[in-house]
Amino acid sequence: MNHQHLPFIILLITGSVICLHPEDMGAKLNDKKQGDRVYPTKNERIRQDHAFKLPQHESLDQLNDNNQRFNFEINHSSEDSVFSASSVIKRKDFIKKQRAKFKIPFDLMYLEEMNETLLPCSPAATGLDSEVTAAVADAIRTVIVTHLHLVFMSEPDICLLNMLWAKGIVLELLDTHSWWIRLFDIDYQSHTQHVLVGSLEWIVVTMEKVKLLYNNSSMNAFNTRWIWVPSFVESDESVSTPWPSRKVSFSNVLNELTSSLQEGMRGIVVFSDRKPSHLYPYETTNASLIKRYVKIGSITAPGDGSWTLKTSSSWFHGNFNILRPLWPRPSFDLQNRTIRITCLQKPTVFEYKEGGGLDEAVGYANDLMLIARRHLNFTDVLVPIDGFGNKDSNGNWNGMVGVLHRKEADIAPLDFTPSYDRSEVVEFGYPVGEDIVLILSKAPAEITKPFLLLQIFSLEVWACIFASALSLGIALEILVKIESILSHKSSWKTWTTRQIGNSLKIFLYQGSTHWPLGAGGRIAASSGLLIALVVGSLYIGSITAFFAIPFRSKPIDTVEELLRSSVRLAIRSKTNTYSTMVQEEDGILHKGRDRVGLFSGTEINTWEFFRIIADGTYALVDVYSSAVGSANSFEKRNEKCKFYISKEAVRTDADVFAFMKNSPIFYQFDKTMQWLRYFGIIEHTKRRYYSVACEVRVSSGGIRPMSVIQVQGSFYVLGIGLFFGFVIFLVEVIWPNAP
C-alpha cells in the first residue's frame, strides 16, 4: 500500500463513523462536561425510560409538522377501525406505535424545562388547554387506578392522550357506544374509574342514563369514580369543533352536573374558564406563557340525603390548592335521617314489639343498632317481615332479602349467612361475628345400674380375684399339711379345704382361727391380705365415685356419632345448611338424608319442636344463634339441662348484616360494625344473650340425702344372695345325705 494514501484512508474511515453514529458521537462529547459526570436532559431521561431513542429535530417547524401528521393519523387511521363503535383498544400500544412511526418525542407538551412555549396542542383545535389536560392527569393519580376508561364525546383529544401517556397512566380508550356496552358488563363489586370528556350537555345526559344503572344495582356507587371534563371553545368561525360555542361559569357547571347525579356517587369535575390567573407568580408579556387557573369541584354529601358539587380545590402550575377533600368519605352524621330497618322475630338476635322501634326491641343485633344510632344520629323505622329471604319459582325474592331488593328498606340487622344468590340482589357488610353450625341434641341422662356392685369390675377382674383366692387357699393348705407332718400331728392321707375357705374370707375382710402357725404360711397369708386390701380399696372407691359423679349417657359431639346413632336429623328448610350439607353429594350430612326432617323457622321456635329434641327423637343441626337462642327459651335456671350442645362444630359461618344495593348508609354502618368488633364490643354484647342458664352451678344449701336409685344395687345383690341361699337350703333338705 502506498504510504501517501494512508492519511486519506484514515480520514475516510473517521468520516464514515461520524456519519453512521452522529448522535452517539455527540452524546460522548457532551458526557465529558463537568468532570466526566453525566447530567442527562429531559429528553434523554425519557429515552432511557422508554427503551428506544428519540431523534434530534433540527427545528420546531419539523417537530410541529410531524406532530400534525401524527394527530391526523390518530384521528383518521383505518387500521382495525381504531375509533369505530365496535372497537375497544388500549391506547398504550397504538400511540407508542404512532410515536415511533412519526418520531414524536414523549415530552410533547414542553420541549425543555427552560422553554415554556406551548407546543401545537391548541385549545381552539381540541377544546382542552394544556393546563386542563395536566390537571386531569394529576386528578386521575389521586385514585387507585384499576380499570380506567377514557371516553370522548367525539374525536379523542390528542393533547390529553399525550399527557396521560407521559404520566404513565394505563387506561382503555373507548368511544361512547363501546363504553356503554362495557358498563353493562361490569361486575357490581368491580372498582372502576371513568373520565368523560365532552360538552356539559352531553355529560349531563350521560349521567342521567348512568343513574338508571345505579337504580338497577348494575353499578356500585362506592367503588366507581367519575372525572368529568366539560370542554368549551370560544367562537371562532375558522375552527370547527364538536362542542358548543358558549361561555359558562364554573358555578353553572356545578349546578347542572349536580342535578344529573344521585346520592352515593363519587366524582370530581375539572374545568377552566380560560381566565388568566391572578396567582401566577411571574410577570410576563407573553400571553401564551400565562398559566390558566383550573378549578376542581367534588361531590359533598352532608349525610341528610342531599348532595351537591362544590369547589374543592384548584390546580395551578402543577400543584393542587386543596380547600376540601377531592374524594370525601361519607358523613358519619346522618342528621336525624330516617333509616328503614327490616327485621323478623329471632330469639336472642332480634325480637321486636308490634308498632315499636329499636327502643322496645331486644336482642344482641338490636343492641348493636342502638349503639350505631347513638353514633350516627338517625331515626329508625322497623319494617317487620317473615323469613330471611328465598327465591321463588318465578325468580322473585321474599323475606328480608326481597324487601331490600325492592328498596323498601335500607338495612337488615340480622345474622345473615352470605350466599352467592343473595349477593346478586343485596349487599353484605363486614362480618359482625362467626356463627358455627352445631348439633343440639338431648342432654345426657343419668344411667341407672341395678347391678352396679357387680359391674364395677369386669369379668376378667372377677376371674382373677377368684383364681387368686383359690390359689392362695391351695398354697396355704399345702403349707399347713407339711407343718402337721413334720410335727407328727397328721399324715398325707388326711386333707381338708379349711385354708381355701380362709383365703376367700381374706377378700371379704373376714377373720379365721385356723391360720398357719409357721413363718412360710404367715408370709403367704400376708401377701393375700395385701392383694385383698388393694382390690377392696378400688372397689369401695369406685362405689364412692359413682355416688359422687353419677354415670350419664354418651352425648352426640360429632357428625359421625350422629350418623351412627338412631336419632333423626332436624334441619330448618330453605337454609344454607340444608342446601350445602344435605342436598349436595359431597355434603357432610348427605349420607343421612333419608333421616332428615325439615322444619320451618316458625316451627323451630315452639316447645312442640323442642320436646322431640328433649326426648331424643331428633337432633337439630343449625347455626349457634338459631339453635341455642331458641333452646334457651325453654331452659330454666337451677334446673337440669334439657339439651346438649356438641363440642365440635359442624361448620363455621360468618354473621353479616344485609343492605340495599347502593345504599347511601352502607359505608357508615359497615365501618361502625368493624370498630365495634375490633374493640370487642360485639362479643361482649353477644355473651349476655348466649349464656346457658342450666349450666350455671348453684349451691344446694347442704348435703343432699342419697336416693334409692343411687343405692338400689346393694339391695339387688342382697336379693340375689338370699335367693341362692334359699335354693341351697332346699337342696340340703331334699338330699340330706348329699356329699
Image: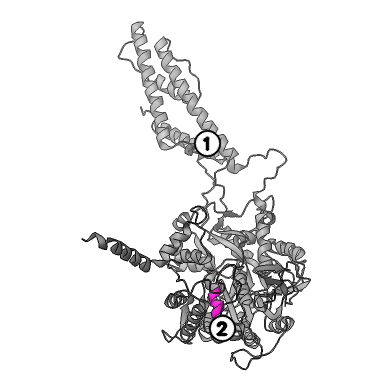
Q: In which quarter of the image is the C terminus?
A: top left
Query: Which of 621 and 659 lies nearest the eye of the viewer?
Result: 659
Determine whether, in the image, residue 42 is placed left or right of residue 656: left
* Residues rendered magenta in the picture: 157-163
> Height in image: 450 above or below 494?
below
> Height in image: 485 above or below 357?
above
**Residue lying furthest top in this view?**
487
The location of residue 589, given as percent across then percent down, is 46, 62
> Height in image: 459 above or below 383?
above
Badge 2: residue crowd in 10 Å (few <14, some 14–19, many ≥20): some
> Is residue 84 highlighted in magenta?
no
**Residue lying furthest bottom in this view?**
237
| Secondary-structure class at tag 1 | helix
Q: Distance between the residues labelled 2 and 1?
A: 103 Å
Please name the residue shown 45% across and 60% down the image.
Answer: 29
The location of residue 83, given as percent across then percent down, is 48, 85
Please name the residue shown 32% across and 11% down the image.
Answer: 491
> Which image quarter: residue 254?
bottom right
> Which image quarter: residue 386?
bottom right
Q: Which mark is residue 152?
A: 2
Please tell me whether the stretch drawn in magenta is mainly helix, strand or loop: helix
> Which amino acid type corresponds to the residue marked 1 in the rendered image?
Leu
How many numbered discs sit on the rendered protein?
A: 2
Which is more foreground, mark 2 or mark 1? 2
